[in-house]
Image (cartoon, rainbow, N blue to C red):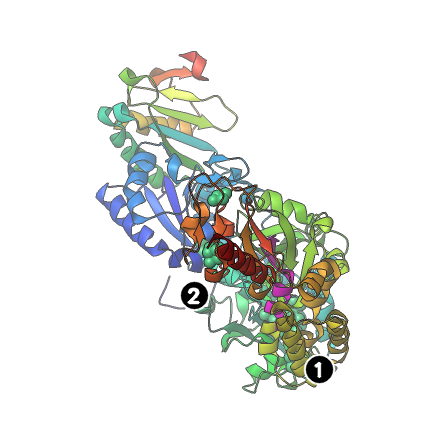
């Protein structure tokens, strides 16, 4: 192959493709050809870089210049200025919200350079569809070591010593799980990969499967060798078509090269891997339900014990691990447990991938050493809150997790410390919330999700979550009664204690944690009929504080109902009879003059207006 | 490779890794030598493209995997274009001027690959202050 003087690494992840990444590539190919540069500059499509909100993105090597939000129209400019003349195009670079300037190089952007990439080490660096590029980054060398130089016990011991815990949510020590299964006698065992990723908003695993599919296979080969399995399945939700096709391509290539199939790398060890596409029910991510689903049955959890390590898929000893867990395995085998433990804490070793979203500047996928304080993640990597917003809480662990308030922002991100707060690390969802989020509504959102997703087997989960959701709905609609908070707490504990699977056992967490830290908000809803965030419409009245209003008219222009009026430079006012409580005026006013009052205020203001009319007539 | 089934060995893995080293030197850094061709307006007018073409061609032919080629804007000495700078890890930058295809090929071979500065084409050695 010829040497290129430059590489254009274009993101081919789901987010960037949706934003037109393929068009950028096509335009770039055409432009390079037109300028006679196609032999000098190579184009590479990678998987997701984790910065999807800024997509389509492209990095130019060797200098590492990072361009964001590209359109095909930008392509000729980049070719002319940057690739031909060597002058990077500043206006297409990343503007950092913290540094407040354009940052040319990817490795200087705080969002990227505060991360430590282990599970995501090939993210944005390799062409996910070329096995050679994976191999060029030490790919399959760990599998070679495990198959040719290590005994199954040595593999298990290395993984145990590393302290790696399952990244799928529960955080169970991976080496211990493998050891349990390795000790069970049996000719037929199974190795499974959980790529169901059911948490709303999560895309950590999708990103690994899309950007680096071979790492999943390599992790599975090593695990299969450790427990003595010769058949593996990757369970992926059908909503992830790109992940499915990249994985299938990887499996085909690995089979062709003898990295899967019979006698892998001449070691005498055999492993076949197949993809199974799940229909996308949340409960199917639970291990026993996933195995039922693989068997072609309805995806419902069953009691444990027997544990899957003893009786799993088709009642055979089985190990199931999460995608990100597998992505951590090859470097542990190559570099050793000691290397893995250089990052993280005693009980939470290594790094964790998070999907950072919500009210912050830099939304995306990040990998950080465990033990990093939440504050650092949110303010340094996340770039802080969007302009003028106040931090209120961060939600960790999705529907099984909870909200962590401002006072606890210095909590280190470890399994133990996060659990202590009432949230969980979970699979890595991290949603930042500002003062415009109503915490009762947040809890309601998650309960609605779990109510829908409960498989219905256990009455406490099926009925209990429904009752809780109904109560929350009442509270947000102004029908809350004194005693509701205590009722929610009692119900929550019953559901946690009597549900069979993790879904029911954790579903009440979002309610419990919001009551714990934001009880005053629940009380204001119930006792004062007031949603201070202005989210629950029946409990909100928007009005203008005449002493703060400078009469700029921004609110009036924003109002879809044309119900705000006032003379220029004079205080404006809202005619309550036309207001639909859409918040637009509140968001539009730069002077904090639009206020949020309790729901009952509306009636009072209407009566006042009526009386004033009477007087003036 | 594609088409017929081919079973890899550990040696094959190492060979594939070596074959792709140039690609990742480019993307990850860690190169031994870097050649910067001045591609300002004057450079291009003076024939910088010819330099670039010759360089990329010869470099591919040489099989070197630890050399990267990049461009920069105007070098600030338009009368001596085309120019190129050669940086070898741990050594001062060498600036070459009045280049043509033949000269850059010699620089590639003698300086970049064999480590001997081609004094007769060199304008200066060291940083900006030297000219
Ligand atoms: C309701 C429910 C949904 C789950 N969904 C997922 C999922 O989408 N992906 C995942 O890896 N684990 C999920 N889990 C956790 C799995 O049951 C299991 O613990 C995990 O896949 C084991 O892999 P690990 O030890 O590598 O994390 C879920 C658990 C529950 C209770
Ligand atoms: S706890 Fe809920 S989701 Fe889990 S088995 Fe019971 S009913 Fe189904
Ligand atoms: S809340 Fe919406 S409808 Fe009501 S006054 Fe403001 S902008 Fe108009
Ligand atoms: S898809 Fe491009 S950054 Fe995520
Ligand atoms: S219109 Fe009242 S402050 Fe803007």
Magenta-colored stretch includes residue A436: yes
Please give the residue where the numbered disc 2 appears in the rendered image.
A242
Instruction: Decide if residue A370 is on the left or right side of residue A542.
Output: right
Question: Residue at coordinates 66% horizontally, 77% vertically from top-left?
Answer: A465
Q: Is residue A47 visible?
A: no
Question: Which residues, given as a range, are shown in magenta?
Answer: A430-447
Name the spot of residue A40 as percent of width and height, x first.
31, 41
| Image marks 1 and 2: residues in contact by CB distance under 8 Å | no
Q: Nearer the viewer, residue A564 or A210?
A: A564
Instruction: Sort mark 2 into few (<14), some (14-19) or many (20+) by Cα contacts within 10 Å.
Output: some
How many angstroms separate mark 1 from mark 2 (CA)?
37 Å
> In the rendering, at what x and y percent does residue A117 appear?
58, 50
Picture coordinates of residue A434 (x, y %)? 60, 52
Q: For this view, does B96 lie left or right of residue A341?
A: left
Residue B68 lies in quadrant:
top left
Foreground pick, B93 / A12:
A12
Please, what secondary structure does the residue beneath circle 2 have? helix
Residue at image x 66%, y 83%?
A: A463
The residue wearing badge 1 is A460
Ligand 2 within 8 A of label 1's CB?
yes
């Amino acid at each position: 192959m010829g040497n290129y003087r430059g590489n254009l690494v274009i993101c081919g992840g789901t987010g960037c493709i949706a934003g037109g990444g393929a068009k950028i590539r096509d335009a770039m190919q055409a432009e390079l050809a037109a300028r006679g540069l196609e032999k000098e500059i190579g184009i590479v499509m990678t998987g997701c870089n984790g910065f999807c909100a800024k997509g389509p993105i492209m990095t130019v090597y060797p200098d590492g210049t990072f361009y964001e939000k590209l359109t095909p129209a930008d392509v000729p400019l980049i070719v002319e200025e940057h690739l031909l003349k060597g002058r990077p195009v500043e206006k297409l670079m990343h503007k950092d919200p913290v540094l407040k300037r354009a940052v040319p190089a990817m490795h200087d952007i705080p969002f990227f350079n505060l991360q430590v990439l282990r599970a995501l080490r090939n993210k944005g660096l390799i062409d996910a569809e070329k096995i050679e590029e994976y191999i060029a980054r030490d790919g399959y060398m760990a599998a070679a070591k495990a198959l040719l130089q290590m005994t199954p016990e040595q593999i298990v011991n290395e993984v145990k010593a590393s302290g790696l815990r399952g990244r799928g949510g529960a955080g169970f020590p991976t080496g211990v799980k493998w050891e349990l299964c390795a000790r069970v006698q049996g000719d037929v065992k199974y190795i499974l990969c959980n790529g169901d990723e059911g948490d709303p908003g999560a895309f950590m695993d999708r990103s690994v499967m899309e950007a680096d599919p071979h790492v999943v296979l390599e992790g599975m080969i090593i695990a299969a060798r450790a427990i003595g399995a010769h058949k593996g399945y990757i369970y992926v939700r059908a909503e992830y078509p790109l992940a499915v096709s990249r994985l299938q391509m990887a499996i085909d290539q690995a089979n062709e090269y003898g990295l899967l199939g019979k006698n892998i790398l001449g070691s005498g060890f055999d492993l076949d891997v197949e993809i199974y596409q799940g229909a996308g029910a949340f409960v199917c991510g639970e291990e026993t339900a996933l195995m039922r689903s693989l068997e072609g049955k309805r995806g419902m959890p069953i009691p444990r014990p027997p544990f899957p390590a003893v009786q799993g898929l088709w009642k055979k000893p089985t190990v199931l691990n999460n995608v990100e867990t597998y992505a951590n395995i090859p470097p542990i085998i190559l570099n050793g447990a000691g290397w893995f433990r250089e990052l993280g804490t005693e009980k939470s070793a290594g790094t964790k991938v998070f999907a950072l979203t919500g009210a912050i500047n830099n939304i995306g996928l990040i990998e950080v050493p465990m033990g990093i304080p939440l504050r650092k993640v949110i303010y340094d990597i996340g770039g802080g809150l969007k302009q003028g917003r106040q931090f209120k809480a961060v939600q960790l662990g999705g529907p099984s997790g909870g909200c962590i308030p401002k006072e606890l922002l210095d909590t280190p991100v470890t399994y133990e410390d996060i659990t202590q707060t009432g949230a969980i690390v979970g699979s890595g969802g991290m949603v930042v919330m500002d003062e415009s989020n109503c915490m009762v509504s947040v809890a309601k959102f998650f309960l609605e999700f779990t109510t829908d997703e409960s498989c219905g087997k256990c009455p406490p989960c099926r009925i209990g979550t429904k009752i809780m959701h109904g109560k929350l709905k009442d509270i947000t609609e102004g029908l809350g009664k004194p005693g509701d908070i205590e009722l929610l707490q009692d119900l929550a504990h019953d559901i946690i204690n009597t549900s069979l699977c993790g879904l029911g056992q954790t579903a009440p967490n979002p309610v419990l944690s919001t009551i714990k830290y934001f009880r005053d908000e629940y009380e204001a809803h119930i006792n004062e009929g007031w949603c201070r965030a202005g989210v629950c419409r029946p409990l909100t009245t928007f009005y203008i504080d005449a002493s703060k209003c400078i009469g700029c008219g921004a609110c009036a222009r924003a109002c879809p109902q044309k119900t705000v009026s006032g003379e220029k430079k004079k205080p404006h006012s809202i005619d309550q009879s036309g207001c639909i409580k859409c918040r637009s005026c509140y968001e539009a006013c730069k002077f904090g003059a639009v206020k949020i009052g309790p729901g009952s205020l509306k009636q009072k203001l209407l009566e006042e207006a009526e009386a004033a009319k009477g007087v003036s007539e | 490779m594609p088409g017929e089934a081919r079973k890899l060995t550990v040696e094959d893995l190492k060979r594939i890794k070596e074959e792709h080293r140039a690609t990742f030197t480019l993307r990850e850094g860690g190169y031994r030598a870097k050649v910067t061709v001045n591609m300002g307006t004057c450079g291009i007018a003076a024939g910088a493209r010819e330099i670039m073409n010759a360089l990329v061609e010869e470099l591919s032919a040489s099989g070197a995997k630890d050399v990267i080629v990049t461009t920069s804007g105007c070098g600030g000495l338009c009368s001596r274009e085309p120019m190129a700078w050669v940086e070898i890890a741990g050594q001062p930058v060498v600036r070459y001027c009045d280049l043509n295809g033949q000269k850059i090929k010699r620089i590639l071979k003698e300086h970049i690959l064999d480590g001997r500065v081609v004094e007769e084409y060199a304008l200066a050695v060291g940083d900006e202050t030297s000219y």
